[in-house]
């Protein structure tokens, strides 16, 4: 059973052999490291680029203009900001050229807190990403979804931002990727590079199969009737944990929606759930002001107002300049299970 | 062309001051037919740009930016490029002074007028973008954008593709001197010269000594932008961009080098800026700047390739035909509001959140 980094690796392997993927590149993406989180280890078409985010994004755009398919990586999303005009341009190229040139590329980057990454390895990029018209934005919460969303992204004719929750890259899933061995140990021996000298190492890839997750489709991870909790990324796991706890301890059934795609997003799934439960909390770890969830909250308020029995709530990271390294600082900056439970109970206890 | 090749063989006997590297003399003649073609395209480009300025002044366009003063560089570049679609051909990563090159590639001047007048019939952008922001996938002309210097980054990617295809295609980049301060310029130099992974890029700079209203001398200590390439052991050249014969022979030589070696060239062309930055600075004719068209006209008259009467006729013919085109284009349809969301995603996939 793969962890998310391994699932990404296997997706890239499948894509380079079956989907015309020609280049996977970024800082330390190629040998010997294969990515700072090992997510590109052993991939044949992976290569190292200069330490130059603008060059990385520009090169990806040029490859797309030439009709090649690539996956480029920005090592941490905190370093993506000096490329923002290129990202805007990648998103607007089809529109500006009136359909003359598409920009089929995938840009992946680790996001979020949870690894004591301190100021420049902990922030999110969700809201910024959703302010880039022309892009599609996805964020998996499980290895299987990572595999499926990445294959979908690579095949999509539009530019796709694949946001990898870095705190989940070592977390194993509960569902097998089609074709992978069930044994964690066996998979590790096949596709994890050895420590030390790996100059002669070659992976022994499992016979993974095509599996895609449609971009724009959410997934209900916990069915429920009392309240809807809309989230994505690493907070899906926390949401599931809190939902299980509330069910066990207080007989409260929380419906957890893992959005998986931020743009386009699955409004039909959110709508159906909120019409049923009549209460909703939106949860993510990005900073709270002009948070992406505020758009979703606005839309619920506009279109589902008369279905609601309580005010919808957004629970997000605090609007601080950074996420401090010490555990006390990090845990009080981004939502924790206790915060999630508190928010759910607050909305549940609100009487109109 | 045979004359040009023979002339190149004699090049070693003469030198020009404006160039570093192998000697090419601007006194050598190109084939007469080619000289006339170059002149005709330069004149057409100038007349077209001046017409576009008039269209703007009369309220037919919101904004003008363009290439008067860069014809002696742009036309030879367009004539020498390998035209077509796909990595086997040259990619064009142009800045917004590309009219001369596009006309040399075969652009219909009406397209330039449709673009500046933002008509629905504008094939490049459907009425969405500025004058000189061209886009022709059939010639690998990638969309011209306003943020300057980004084209130096995107050319890295087409260059990688061309290298992979072993195509002999070149990724051609044009841009101004002011923009060479942007990080993309440095990115391009670094990525183009990675040891063992060199890219077939023709990295050009049109140095008109201005960045909008800021002069080059107040911002740049480097005597020549092209000198920055020396640090990367790449071929560098500086040309008199107001002499189309020098630029033609120089570009030809540079392109042959790139196609043969797969290695990049950094070439700076000293050009004029005859109508200022854009309509934002008034689009008035600037005195004291060399006009490459007039200089070339004089040279061709001196060499008896053209007569004064012929010059007058060529200019007049272009004036009348472009004036007629402008009148026709002004009657064409404007874009409509229902096209706003078109081409946000490929294949008209919905991108409007209201319809998710």
Image (spheres, coloured by chain):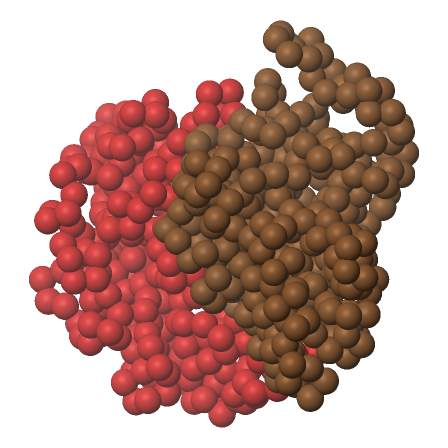
Quarter occupied by residue B123: bottom right
Closer-to-camera residue (A317/A346)? A346
> B125 left or right of A20?
left
Which quarter of the rendering shows the N terminus of chain B?
Answer: top left
Q: How many marks?
A: 0
Q: Position of residue A313 (x, y in %)?
A: 59, 70
> A276 left or right of A290?
right
Which quarter of the rendering shows the C terminus of chain B?
Answer: bottom right
Residue B350 seen: no
Q: Which residue occupies 87% across, 25% down?
A: A183
Q: Position of residue B323 (x, y in %)?
A: 38, 84
Q: Colour of chain B?
A: red
Question: As displayed, is residue A179 above or below residue A278?
Answer: above
Q: Position of residue B297 (x, y in %)?
A: 24, 60
Quarter occupied by residue B190: top left
Closer-to-camera residue (A104/A343)? A343
Furthest toward the bottom, the residue is: B331
> A57 left or right of B341?
left
Q: Which residue occupies 27% across, 85% down?
A: B57
Residue B119 seen: yes
Closer-to-camera residue (A41/A25)? A41
Q: Which residue occupies 31% across, 46% down?
A: B182
Furthest toward the front, the residue is: A249
Q: Which residue occupies 67% across, 44% down?
A: A69
Q: Colour of chain A?
A: brown
Q: Position of residue A244 (x, y in %)?
A: 78, 52
Closer-to-camera residue (B342/B93)? B342
Quarter occupied by residue B39: bottom left
């Amino acid at each position: 059973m793969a962890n998310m980094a391994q699932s990404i690796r296997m997706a890239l392997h499948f894509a380079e052999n079956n989907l015309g993927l020609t280049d996977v590149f970024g800082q330390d993406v190629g040998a010997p490291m294969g990515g700072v989180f090992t997510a590109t280890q052993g991939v044949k078409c992976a290569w190292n680029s200069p330490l130059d985010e603008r060059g990385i994004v520009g090169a990806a755009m040029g490859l797309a203009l030439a009709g090649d398919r690539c996956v480029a990586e920005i090592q941490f999303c905190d370093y993506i900001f000096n490329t923002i005009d290129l990202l805007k341009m990648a998103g607007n190229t089809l529109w500006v050229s009136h359909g003359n040139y598409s920009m089929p590329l995938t840009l992946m980057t680790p996001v979020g807190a949870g690894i004591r990454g301190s100021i420049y390895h902990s922030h999110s990029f969700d809201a910024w990403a959703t302010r880039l018209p022309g892009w599609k934005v996805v964020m998996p919460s499980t290895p299987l979804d990572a595999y499926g969303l990445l294959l979908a992204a690579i095949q999509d004719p539009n530019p796709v931002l694949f946001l990898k929750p870095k705190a989940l890259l070592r977390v194993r899933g509960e569902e097998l990727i089609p074709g992978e061995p069930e044994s964690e140990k066996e998979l590790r021996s096949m596709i994890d590079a050895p420590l030390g000298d790996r100059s002669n190492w070659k992976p022994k890839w499992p016979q993974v199969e095509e599996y895609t997750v449609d971009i724009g489709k959410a997934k209900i991870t916990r069915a429920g009737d009392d309240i809807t909790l809309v989230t994505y990324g690493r907070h899906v796991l926390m949401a599931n944990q809190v939902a299980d706890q509330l069910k066990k301890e207080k007989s409260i059934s929380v419906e957890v929606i893992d959005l998986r795609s931020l743009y386009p997003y699955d409004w039909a799934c959110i709508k159906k759930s909120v019409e049923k439960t009549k209460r909703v909390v939106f949860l993510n770890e990005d900073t709270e002001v002009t948070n992406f969830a505020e758009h979703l909250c606005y839309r619920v308020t506009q279109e589902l107002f008369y279905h609601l029995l309580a005010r919808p709530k957004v629970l997000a990271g605090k609007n601080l300049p950074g996420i401090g390294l010490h555990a006390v600082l990090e845990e009080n900056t981004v939502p924790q299970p206790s915060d999630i439970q508190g928010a759910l109970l607050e909305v549940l206890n609100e009487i109109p | 062309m045979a004359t040009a090749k023979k002339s190149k063989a004699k090049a070693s006997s003469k030198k020009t001051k404006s160039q570093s590297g192998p000697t090419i003399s601007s006194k050598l003649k190109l084939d007469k037919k080619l000289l006339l073609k170059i002149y005709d395209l330069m004149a057409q480009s100038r007349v077209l740009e001046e017409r576009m300025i008039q269209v703007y002044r009369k309220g037919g366009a919101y904004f003008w930016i363009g290439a008067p003063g860069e014809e002696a560089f742009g036309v030879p570049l367009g004539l020498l490029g390998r035209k077509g679609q796909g990595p086997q051909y040259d990619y064009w990563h142009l800045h917004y002074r590309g009219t001369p090159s596009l006309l040399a590639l075969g652009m219909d001047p009406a397209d330039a007028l449709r673009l500046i007048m933002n008509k629905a019939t504008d094939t490049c952008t459907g009425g969405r973008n500025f004058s000189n922001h061209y886009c022709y996938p059939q010639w690998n002309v990638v969309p011209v954008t306003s943020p300057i210097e980004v084209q130096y980054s995107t050319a890295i990617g087409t260059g990688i593709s061309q290298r992979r295809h072993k195509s002999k295609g070149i990724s051609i980049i044009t841009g101004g001197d002011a923009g060479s301060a942007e990080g993309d310029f440095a990115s391009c130099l670094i990525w183009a010269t990675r040891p063992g992974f060199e890219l077939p890029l023709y990295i050009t700079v049109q140095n008109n000594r201005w960045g909008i209203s800021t002069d080059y001398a107040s911002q740049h200590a480097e005597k020549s932008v092209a000198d920055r390439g020396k640090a990367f052991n790449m071929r560098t050249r500086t040309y008199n961009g107001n002499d189309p014969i020098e630029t033609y022979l120089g570009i030809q030589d540079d392109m042959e080098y790139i196609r043969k070696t797969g290695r990049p060239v950094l070439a700076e062309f000293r050009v004029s800026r005859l109508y200022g930055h854009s309509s934002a600075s008034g689009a008035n004719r600037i005195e004291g700047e060399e006009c490459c068209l007039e200089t070339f006209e004089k040279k061709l008259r001196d060499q008896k390739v053209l007569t004064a009467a012929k010059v007058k006729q060529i200019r007049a013919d272009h004036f009348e035909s472009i004036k007629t085109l402008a009148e026709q284009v002004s009657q064409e349809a404007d874009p409509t509001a229902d096209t706003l969301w078109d081409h946000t995603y490929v294949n008209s996939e919905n991108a409007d959140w209201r319809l998710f």
